[in-house]
Image: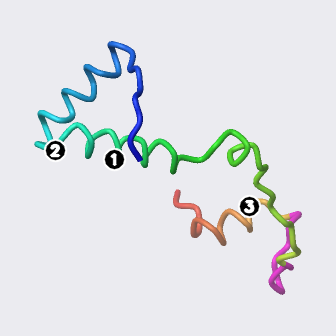
Amino acid sequence: MRTTVTLDDDIAAKLRDRMRRSGATFKETLNTCLRRGLEEPTDTDLATPFKVEARSMGLRPGIDLDDIGGLLDLLDGPARP
């Protein structure tokens, strides 16, 4: 598709810099940048909340949640003097 676009000065400068670094033509550079920009997630994609479904993990037999010292020994090993 052939079309005419008007670029802001800062965008044109960035395209020229990217063209110089990559060695690509203006058309290739512009298409690459547009593809990358259009593939980024949109605001509606980002607005979808992340949901965690809770589930019971149960307790191992013999673990007493009321014995904090015992739990710490279980997790970290016996306390050293």
Q: Earlier in the sequence, mark 3 or mark 2?
A: 2
In the rendered image, which quarter is residue 72 located in? bottom right
Spatial separation of the CA atoms under disc 3 and disc 1: 60 Å
Structure colour scheme = rainbow
Spatial separation of the CA atoms under disc 3 and disc 2: 66 Å
Task: Find residue 6 and report its horizontal and vertical position in percent.
Answer: 40, 20
Task: Find residue 40 and report its horizontal and vertical position in percent.
Answer: 53, 46
Q: Who's the residue at 52% across and 60% down the image?
A: 80
Amino acid under label 1?
Thr
According to the picture, the residue beneath numbered tag 1 turns out to be 32
Could you tell me if the residues under marks 3 and 2 are in contact, i.e. CB atoms within 8 Å? Answer: no
Q: Main secondary structure of the magenta part?
A: loop
Magenta-highlighted residues: 58-66
The furthest residue to the top: 9
Q: Earlier in the sequence, mark 3 or mark 1?
A: 1
Amino acid under label 2?
Ala
Q: Earlier in the sequence, mark 2 or mark 1?
A: 2
Q: Who's the residue at 41% across and 26% down the image?
A: 5
Could you tell me if the residues under marks 2 and 1 are in contact, i.e. CB atoms within 8 Å? Answer: yes
Task: Find residue 44 and report its horizontal and vertical position in percent.
Answer: 73, 43
Q: Who's the residue at 85% across and 66% down the image?
A: 53
Q: Is residue 65 above or below residue 23?
A: below
- Judged by depth in the image, the label closer to the viewer, 3 or 2, is 2
According to the picture, the residue beneath numbered tag 2 turns out to be 24
According to the picture, the residue beneath numbered tag 3 turns out to be 69
Nearer to the camera, 71 or 18? 18
Amino acid under label 3?
Gly
> How crowded is the residue under tag 1: few (<14 C-alpha within 10 Å), some, or many (20+)?
few
